[in-house]
Image: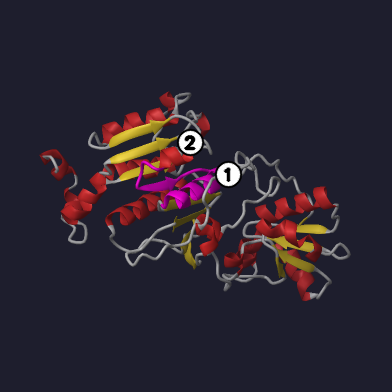
Amino acid sequence: MFSPDELKRYNRHIILPEFGMEGQTKLKQAKVLVIGAGGLGCPVLQYLAAAGVGTIGIVDFDTVDESNLQRQVLFLTEDIGKPKAEVAAQKLSLQNPHSKLKIQNSKLDKSNALQIICEYDLVVDGSDNFPTRYLVNDACVILNKPLIFGSIFKFEGQVTVFNYTDKSGKRGPTYRCLFPEAPAAGEVPNCSEIGVLGVLPGLIGTMQANEAIKVITGIGECLSGKLFVLDALTMHTSIIKFSANEENYKIRELGEYEEICEAPSTNFSDEISVQELKEKLDKKENIFLVDVREPHESEICSIGGVLIPMSRLRDNIEKIPTDKPVVLYCHHGMRSAMVAKFLREEFGYKNLINLEGGIHAWATEIDQEMERY
């Protein structure tokens, strides 16, 4: 099964009692598809290849840009302008010649997703946009494939495992169980403008690779039904539990997935600092607070007010008054700024104020005992 070179290469795995030859054999027999060879995909690919995954698929239609080099450490300056999937495959084959690499130098879309994904045992999603995430989730649900999810935003990263069936046969939550609907255009920040700390994709991508290895080999406990959240600035971590909605297993065909990542920047001028908000609250001024985070975030910590998740905004417009100051807040202030801009432009609101820095700033500067995530 293994050549002398492979036995030497994977020795540190094999001598682990919990892993052994059985675990390494499972890795060699596994077929893993990695969506995206960017910030998350680079560490995922490198560690899966190094670990000895037998077949690794790479889907990416982009080329290497100089701005990628700050975080996509698989690429060098000399690779600028070259197709990411091809460059990644060349370098991974040098890293481990025993892994079979299959590249798909084209965009994953409704026309090819099922055909591509069906060839693999599990999928690792390293994409950076909502349409692809929902597309990949729905395809994995239809084909009953486990999905390792990761996302990054500025200084924060998230990891979880979707659509995983445990040893007892119980199926775990899907992406839609955590995020039922994609935000509408104009409700998310521009993907090319928000920025990201260079080391963050390395941290989150490595954790995705770890989850993939656990799912393949059956060791440990994977993050099914648990969202791992990391704040790279404080190194504070938390795990948010969430449950499955069985209605989300009933997807039988792929839908339409709009590109919603090209929203314009907010340039929202009406903001309030956490110190100013505290002063107004202490004075009991007539302020209406709106939390636009998701319910699982609000359970961790809250300043109060009405919870109207950004993903449910359109269905709850009537809850937001027009006759008093409304302060919107989220985790770091980006989502609430987008919501404010959307409400002003689409519904004519003139009384909206965004909380600068969000609840994270409140926990850091006002209430240090507040739980952070």
Disc 2 packing (10 Å; few <14; some 14–19; many ≥20): few
Relative to 170, is 76 above or below? above
Residue holding disc 2 = 112
Return the residue nearer the eye: 132 or 342: 132
Q: Is residue 182 left or right of residue 244?
A: right
Q: Is residue 366 left or right of residue 74?
A: right
Read off the magenta span.
118-144
Q: Which corner quadrant holds the N terminus?
A: top left
Relative to 218, is 36 above or below? above
Disc 1 packing (10 Å; few <14; some 14–19; many ≥20): some
Q: Which residue lies most toward the right here?
A: 323
Q: Provide residue 4's location: percent of width, then percent of height.
A: 10, 40
Instruction: Report how far apart the C-alphas of labels 2 and 1 lie in the structure.
Output: 14 Å
Residue holding disc 1 = 131
Q: Is residue 291 magenta?
A: no
Q: Is residue 8 left or right of residue 354?
A: left
Q: Earlier in the sequence, mark 2 or mark 1?
A: 2
> Residue at left 64%, top 43%?
260
Q: Provide residue 292's location: percent of width, then percent of height.
A: 68, 61
Quarter where residue 286 is shown: bottom right
Under mark 1, the amino acid is Pro
Under mark 2, the amino acid is Asn
Q: Which residue lies most toward the left here?
A: 4
Q: Provide residue 266's location: percent of width, then percent of height.
A: 72, 46
Relative to 44, is 74 above or below? above
Return the residue nearer the eye: 50 or 360: 50
User: SS of the residue at dot 2?
Assistant: loop
Q: Is residue 356 left or right of residue 250?
A: right
Relative to 78, is 373 above or below? below
> Residue at left 17%, top 56%?
20
Marker count (numbered): 2
